[in-house]
Image (cartoon, rainbow, N blue to C red):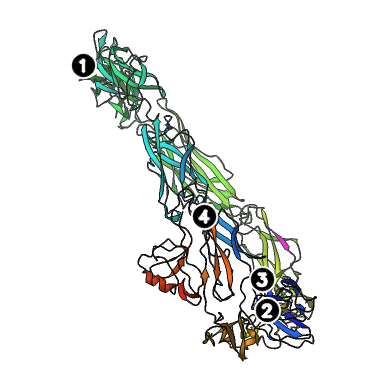
Amino acid sequence: MRKFIPVVLSLIMASPLTALAQSGSSIELRVKNAGEATGPSGTTYPSVVNSAAPRPDALVTGSHVTITDFRDIVISVDGAPSASTSITLQDGEGTPAGTQDVIPLFMDKPLSAAITSGGEHFRIIDDKCTGKLLGAPNTSYSTCEVMIEPRATWWGPLSGNLRLSSGSYSMDLPLSGTARHFDPLRLALSVISGDPANFDVNGAFSRGNLFAGTPAYSTENVTFRVANLSSEYATPRLATILSNTANFEFVTDGCSGASLPPNGACDMVVRGKSTWWGNWSGTLQVASVGNPEGDPDITLTTNLAGRAHHFDPPRLAITTVSGDPTHLDVLGPAQPSYSEPLVLRVRNLSTEFPTYPLDSSLAATSGPGSFEFLTNGCAGAALAVMGTCDISLRARASWWGPIASAYSAHGNSEAGTIGATQELLGRAHRFDPLTLEISAVTGNPTEMDVFGPGTATLTYSSPVTLRVRNRSTEYATTALAAILSNSNDFEFVAGANGCSGAVLPPGATCDAQVRAKAAWFADLSGVLTVSASGLPDAQDDAVAQQALVARAHHFDPVTMSVTAVTGDSASMDVVGTGDGTLAFSAPVTLRVRNHSSEYTTTSLTTALSNPDNFAFISDDCSARTLAPNATCEVTTRAKSDWWGGLAGIFTVTAVNLPDGQGTADAQIDLTGRAYHFDAPRPTLTLVSGDPALMDITGWAKNIVAYSSAVSYRVTNESTEESTEPLSLGFNNSGNFEFTSDGCAGVQLTPGASCSVTFRAKAVQNGSFTGTLTVDNHKRPSVSLAGTGKQFFTYSWVTGSWAGCTANPTWGGWGTCSSSCGSGTQSRGCNGTSGTETRAVSCQRDDGTDLGAVADTYPGCDTSNRPSASQGCTRSCAGSSEQACYDISTCTYSWADWTGWGACSASCGGGSTSGSQNCKRSDGAYVDWSNCNPAWAGTWEVSKSGSTYTWGTSCNTHDCCEPRNHVTAYGSWSASCGTASRTVYWSNGCGSDWTETETANRGSCENCGQAQNGWIINTSNEIRHWGQWIIATNVSPERCKELCNGRGSGACNRLYDNACYFAPGHTLKYFGQEEMLGNIIVSYQCN
């Protein structure tokens, strides 16, 4: 819609005049009435002399337009000019000229309203604008209303356009909105794969309670899908619930906690599980709680069912009904004989599956008998769940012994081969009675000679081993009794009587050793008796006997012995002097004894087996005979001139003894050791190096440095003795140390050697000495000497800091702290940081400069090296903050409006004024020129400082007496739907016009109450867009009063020509005081 800034020029200028639109850029101007003027009588005449001037309503582009020779002129600006747009009139010399007055400007073309796009989303349901000529802004009839109803059949954004047009000018008003809750949240639960009513769990006889409680799972999973059927709403977070978690579980659950977008879906995979067979069921629920738009909660439920099987396989167990399967004994002597019957029961332990027909059989029998069925109720039996069958059997035998077999029930089943076995044991007896026998194993029980020592000493013969045998193959003996009839001359050998108290199994034996005993010679005899009594099965005692005969003789033969009376014949040591001189041991006296109390020896002979190392000092035994129990003595000693072991034998002999005794002799060993004839002698021999020149060249003080190594060999020159453990050392361990010591703790055997290597060490300059010594062996030693030199100290030396690289510069000023008025702004200092350096070098104590080394010399390592560079800072000169003043973003607006004063005239055109102050957005009052003083229909009265006073026209109606007349509306163009009709106006003061009204007359199928129109309600307020209200409580007098006495017709039924409100009559209209001049109409359906 075009915004008009009308200008009235009251001064006619003869010179050209220029109108400037001072907006800072080119705008579009329209010059109206520049070529013609209309007088009070309605006649038109030229007002522009110069034909080059713009013609009426011509569009002029630019910021200057030149008009010459004109009278009344109106300039309008297309579009909505900014607040700074103004019109300035000046003459050709650039001097301001003329006056400008703002007058109300009425719309000259009827207004129309139409939906130009989005008709499917918006429609006009009440149009008070189309066909209207609106008055100037802020005057009566300057506004109208169009009521638009949004509509939709589906959710989503709504958009459209309302176009308002007047003549060639139009204005588009975008329409927008949102349609929602057309597709509320709906969920569907479906099965994608699998059958939720047939979860099949096969335990395969390997899972479940019989197998450590491990669950088995369904062979096929079921996939469920939850779909959001709404294209409009997402779901809240979903909850998923399985009612029977013992038999169902999620494999994957993509729905729990998921929020499904519109048309989205999620999947859940469920499987069955079980630890025992049977049928089970449950439910799967999906819940959506707290749904959008307050919609009810949604719960989806589906039933789940399944079957578990093959968890309890058929299994067989055998129990005893009567009898004892481990004692099926057969008692003879009848051949054959039988045991008592045994009854066994076979049971199917499965609670789920029966067995197939069973085989019922006996295994092969071991032993002298067999087993046989009496009844066999299990052969071919198919046992039901927990079913049983019975069999009976017995043992038979014709000879004694253990018998064994097994009963077996077996067959096939749903789980494959099954079976159970019962061991069968028994014994057959009373078939072979018990007898004993005795036999000699070693020796002769009737020739048991006792060869005595010749004294009344108890002496024994060699043992005779006798064996007792149980001849029965069936019975074991009871505990045997073994008795000697002559225990004075015979006895059992201790620990060798295996028969007394022994229990012999069938065919078993035991041994007993018997010997004769005597203290003097004699003939001996006796009897051995072995018996078993209390035999099983009422048998008689079993008895066996053996005769015993012996002779005792030779109780005191000739025997001799040699013993040392003084000294030790085993330790006849000779201690030398270390130089190979002959030396002797201490004497040893030997005594020879004849131990026989019965015989005298023949002539004795004596001898030494090693005369080189042993010699007699005296000999009283040689050629002498010894009477019974007599003795004689000899004295001997050892001798040697070198180290080594000594050994010899002294022997005394008597030959041709009486009574065939032969020769008797006695010996004694003579031993000793000759030592300390060649003592240990360690020596030191230089192998390499010079012990007197062990000089050291160092490089740093207190850093140890070493000389070249020196090696020595230590040798034991003795051929006889080893050294004690060696210990080599230095008397100055501060300057000498071993690099290897092969002699420490070593005992050198004769002729052996070891080596040591050592070196000198020092940490500073100077001479040093020392001694290497071999301890414990007369301390052979070697003198050592050396000199340390070139041991320096090192330290870091630094120069002065210099050359800071910082280059501080100021940055730009920041934004003012106030966007409108006084404030502060700051700036930053950049480049304040840099580095500075200094020289760092390592210096030796002799003044040598080694440069910037690192980790090379002690005292010059990285741990204590001074830094060669460090950070430094420099500041910018000047201040970082300053005051600022910024009004570039300030906004200006009028404030403190005083309101319009009283009008200077009651009709024919008067004036009134009002004032406001120009105020900046920071609250400061500023010069009025900062605010736009142009108000439509106003002019300047005065201006001073921030205050501006406006003037405006008022009571512009003619002073003629109004004789307003309005004709009746013409007929409607249609009886239903959208229709229009025309009314003609005349106010009696020279103004006539027509008005066309459009209305919706209701549905063409069923004409009902009127839509659109203005009504008077019971509060006497004029409104529209409401339901019809029949003003039954408004009296005709009141109606006439409202119409200033010009109305006619009943108020309770308002017709087209009900009444007319004259200009200047005030009624409430939407809560505002408005000047109305219109018709109140009611539309009825014909």
Residue behind mark 3: 79
Mark closest to the chain's N terminus, 4 or 2: 2
Q: Nearer the viewer, mark 4 or mark 3?
A: 3
Q: Earlier in the sequence, mark 1 or mark 2?
A: 2
Dot 4 lies on which element?
Answer: loop
- Distance Cα–Cα, label 2 vs label 3: 12 Å
**Which quadrant would the N terminus be assigned to in this image?**
bottom right
In the image, is residue 469 above or below residue 595?
Answer: above
- Disc 1 versus disc 3: nearer the observer: 3
Q: Which one is in front, 121 or 1064?
A: 1064
Whether residue 712 is in magenta: the answer is: yes
Which residue is labeled 2 in the image?
85
Q: Identify the main secondary structure in magenta.
A: strand
Q: Which kind of residue does numbered mark 4 sit on?
A: Arg
Report which residue position mark 4 lands on. Answer: 151
Q: Identify the magenta region.
A: 707-716
Q: Position of residue 429 (x, y in %)?
A: 26, 15
Q: Quadrant of residue 65?
A: bottom right
Q: CA distance from mark 4 to mark 3?
A: 32 Å
Question: Label 1 belongs to which residue?
Answer: 537
* SS for dot 2: loop
| Dot 1 amino acid type | Asp
Query: Which x, y percent locates residue 695?
Result: 76, 70
Q: Quadrant of residue 41?
A: bottom right
Left or right of residue 644: residue 783 = right
204 over 801 or under it: above or below: above
